[in-house]
Amino acid sequence: MKASLGFRAGLLSLLIFAAIAGLWQLATQPTAVSGPAMDPEYAKLVGAAAATGQKSAMPTPAEIGATMWKQLQDPFYIRGSNDKGIGIQLAYSLGRVLLGFGLAALVAVPLGFLIGMSPLVYRALDPFIQVLKPVSPLAWMPLALYTIKDSAISSIFVIFICSVWPMLINTAFGVAGVRREWLNVARTLEVGPLRTAFRVILPAAAPTIMTGMRISIGIAWLVIVAAEMLVGGTGIGYFVWNEWNNLSIANIVTAILLIGLVGLLLDQALASLTKLVTYPE
Amino acid sequence: MSERPLISVEGLARRFGEGQPAVFEDLWFGVERGEFVCLIGHSGCGKTTILNVLAGLDQPSDGAVIVDNREIDGPSLDRAVIFQGHALLPWLTVMGNIAFAVSSRWPSWDKARVQEHAKKFIELVGLKGAEAKRPAQLSGGMKQRVGIARALSIQPKMLLMDEPFSALDALTRGMLQDEVLRICADTNQTVFMITHDVDEAILLADKIVLMTNGPGARIAEIVVNTMPRNERHRNDLHRHPQYYAIRNHLVEFLVNRSKAFDKEIAEHGHDPRRPRLVKPGLAAVNPPAEVVPLTTGRRQ
């Protein structure tokens, strides 16, 4: 009997995972057991890897699994400003992303509406959008730090700047692309401009706008890690940088996997929202 | 100005771009209250543009449309449009689409009243039970029914229809034509409809306006459908004594005369303000006077 495609795909995924983990395990296997036992005091000081001399700083998959388990068992602890649980750090990042993204939506959707409705505004703003859109959001960081003088708000500003463009462009595109006949229906029914905007244009453009939001939140989640590495203090990006300074690769790999997981959840959330406003034609 | 028809088209012309030849020009015709008028012509003669001007969605380059003794200057709830491509809002249900129109007409009505009113028109077009469906779940014929219900639900003074049945299969088209005929008769609706289907025009219209080919299209003549409304039935239309005379007249026009109308004007003259009214149907039942000498005698 043939198993379902989903089952076979899952099996293949597991095999691939096992192969990668196996290769990794082989590559990071400690070559030989260390010679004379070291003074435990010294070993503690330089770190076990340095002390034994043979083992690289690269952890084995098993060690990463152990670290991850430890991190996930107590994700929300706070032991001083440089030692917070990974859950707390993720929450900080998520909060910044949602705040910056929300502010960007508040600006981008109405502005995109205006651009989409008015060819004049479209042409007037086009050069600004074209020049500013390709700028890496991190390039705004010094400017933000100088003017805002607050690193936490600056990182939110960077998120704002990077999420504004896809939403702005998609909203304008969606609004400009509303079918002429739907607008004509509104006109023949003498529907006022505000009601037309909310009852016809917005629902018609909603799927395109939501797609822009989905792109935006993806980019925002990419950028927050880099932004937090720069500004420091809190957040998953800072955590990664901190663990790099601690040379705790296991923690970094844990963070990478969690960043991926949260990014996936954000994307899925926006995808299901998009589905909600999508209409079949 | 007392005896203007409900819709009076006066000297209408439309050019797309300065210095371009007009798509149509110098159009004069009227639609009386309660009348069903069809406009027939080949594609490219600006039929849809005329309808858009009547709807207020497009502005004429010259001339005006007078409705109820007032020149129209934009769309109005008095003139409901049934669009060629049904133009339903796909994110709304059948009920939502019609309720949107109803609440546009009567903004002060509460939801229950709007729905109740919408329901009446959903039933009128035979869509009872499909209220909660979205347009994507409906067949082409059902979609067009929703479009008709939407147009009727605002109880307009007139209906403007742009080839409403052209995208439907023959069977559905026939059924909908019958229904439109019935509804228009029941409500004594004034209708202006664009079509390129000769049989549809004969079945539905009281007058058929014939347009020549564009560019520079004009009204050649207006055919009066002398078959009374109660004698027009889709199933035995072809048995009616006047049917073939009217049909042949229309087909002859579309095939030959529509493209060589300038020659006709040169020979017979043409007053664009008063297009000739012709009654080819009567010629079939009452032979022309000159071949029946007896009647000539009686008249004197």
Image: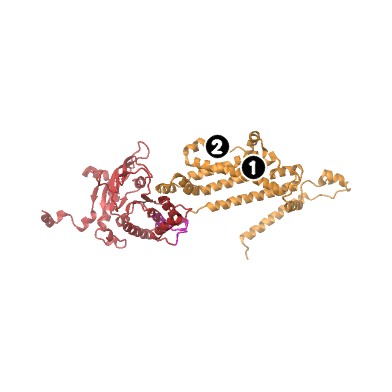
- Share a chain, discs 1 and 2? yes
Chain ID at mark 1: A
Eye-nearest disc, 1 or 2? 1
Labels 1 and 2 touching (C-beta < 8 A) = no
Q: Quadrant of the N terminus of chain A?
A: bottom right
Q: Amino acid at mark 1?
A: Val
**In the picture, which chain is red?**
B
Amino acid bearing label 2:
Gln
How crowded pointer 1 is (Cα within 10 Å; few <14, some 14-19, many 20+) is rated as: many
- Name the mark on residue A130: 2
> Measured along the vertical axis of the image, is residue B248 above or below residue A51?
below
Name the residue tied to disc 1.
A223
Q: Nearer the viewer, residue B44 or B80?
A: B80
> Would residue A84 appear left or right of A172 to someone viewing this image?
right
Numbered disc 1: secondary structure: helix
Say above or below: A145 vs B135.
Answer: above
Q: Nearer the viewer, residue B126 or B278?
A: B126
